[in-house]
Image (spheres, rainbow, N blue to C red):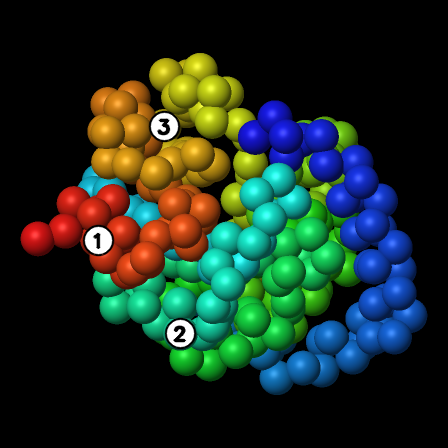
């Protein structure tokens, strides 16, 4: 995580340029005319509620700090594997330069896998929320370290108006510190650095039951088997 945050400003500057270019090529009206924009959302938050351990499995080929995580990368095949092995939802990386993701992955996975999808990207502009909905996302990631409080609230409100759930990201250590003070009714998702059931049990003891797992799954020889292990279904 510390290495990742060193990249944050560089990534944000690049993303702003990309969003500007995309907006010129594909106006808001064109996004709203895409077939997926009008389809009902699948209920990202609802899929994660309940007292049992739930995992958002991440479809992710690379990261700026770790490089290529998986040479043979079939996003739709991986998504199907995660669904078959108990994922409650999927996180799909869509940032192209640093994470080798794509919005097209969202659309292709949406067609093949019935569970909710999170667009994981560096959201800085409301245009990206419209993109997310038009390519089939049910939720979007909002990174606290990237957004000032006013913009964070604005994007949360806009996401809600589009029927998209918003996952607001803080660091793992912050999560542990905040868990005892989380108000009733809040859904806590722990992410980054999760790679074994022991970590999960420690966080579950503090009241967390939902985990987003990416690199541990992508590096595993058999991602589906690793997911079963983390869910406690490895037998």
Q: Secondary structure at mark 1?
A: helix
Front in this rendered view, residue 215 or 18: 215
Q: Residues within 10 Å of mark 3 (few under 14, many from 20)?
A: few
Q: Give the structural element (helix, strand or loop) at label 2.
A: helix
Q: Check disc 1 and report the residue beneath it.
A: 228
Along the line of sight, which residue is nearer the eye, 180 or 157?
Answer: 180
Q: Can I make out residue 48 in this image?
A: no
Q: CA distance from mark 3 to mark 1?
A: 29 Å
Question: How far apart are labels 1 and 2 at the CA level?
Answer: 17 Å
Q: Mark 2 and mark 3 in contact (Cβ < 8 Å)?
A: no
Q: Which residue is mark 2?
A: 77
Which quarter of the rendered picture does the N terminus lie within?
A: top right
Find residue 184 and name its label: 3
Residue occupying the point 39% across, 45% down = 216
Mark positioned earlier in the residue sequence (3 or 2): 2
Q: Residue 107, percent across and down? A: 56, 76
Percent position of residue 194, x then y: 38, 36
Picture quadrant of residue 68:
bottom right
- Classify 87 as above or below 209: below
Position of 151 with respect to 63 (left or right) is right
- The numbered mark at residue 114 is none
Which dot, 3 or 1, sits closer to the camera? 1
Question: From where the camera sits, is residue 83 visible?
Answer: yes
Please report whichever mark, 1 or 2, sits nearer to the chain's N-terminal start. Answer: 2
Q: Is residue 54 left or right of residue 151?
A: left
Frontmost residue, 87 versus 39: 87
Q: Residue at x 21, y 53 (%)?
A: 228
């Amino acid at each position: 995580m510390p290495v990742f945050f060193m990249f944050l400003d560089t990534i944000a500057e690049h993303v702003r340029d990309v969003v500007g270019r995309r907006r010129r090529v594909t106006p808001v009206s064109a996004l709203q005319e895409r077939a997926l924009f009008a389809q009902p959302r699948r209920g990202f938050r609802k899929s994660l509620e309940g007292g049992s351990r739930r995992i958002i499995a991440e479809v992710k080929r690379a990261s700026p700090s770790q490089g290529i995580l998986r040479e043979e990368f079939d996003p739709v095949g991986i998504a199907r594997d995660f669904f078959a092995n108990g994922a409650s939802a999927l996180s799909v990386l869509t940032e192209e330069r640093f994470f080798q993701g794509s919005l097209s992955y969202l659309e292709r996975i949406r067609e093949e896998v019935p569970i909710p999808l999170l667009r994981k990207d560096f959201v800085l502009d409301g245009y990206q929320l419209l993109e997310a909905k038009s390519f089939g996302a049910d939720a979007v990631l909002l990174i606290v370290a990237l957004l000032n409080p006013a913009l964070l609230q604005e994007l949360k409100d806009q996401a809600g108006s589009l029927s998209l759930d918003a996952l607001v990201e803080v660091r793992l250590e912050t999560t542990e510190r905040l868990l005892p003070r989380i108000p009733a009714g809040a859904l806590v998702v722990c992410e980054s650095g999760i790679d074994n059931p022991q970590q999960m049990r420690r966080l579950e003891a503090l009241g967390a039951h939902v985990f987003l797992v990416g690199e541990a799954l992508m590096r595993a020889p058999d991602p589906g088997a690793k997911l079963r292990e983390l869910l406690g279904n490895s037998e």
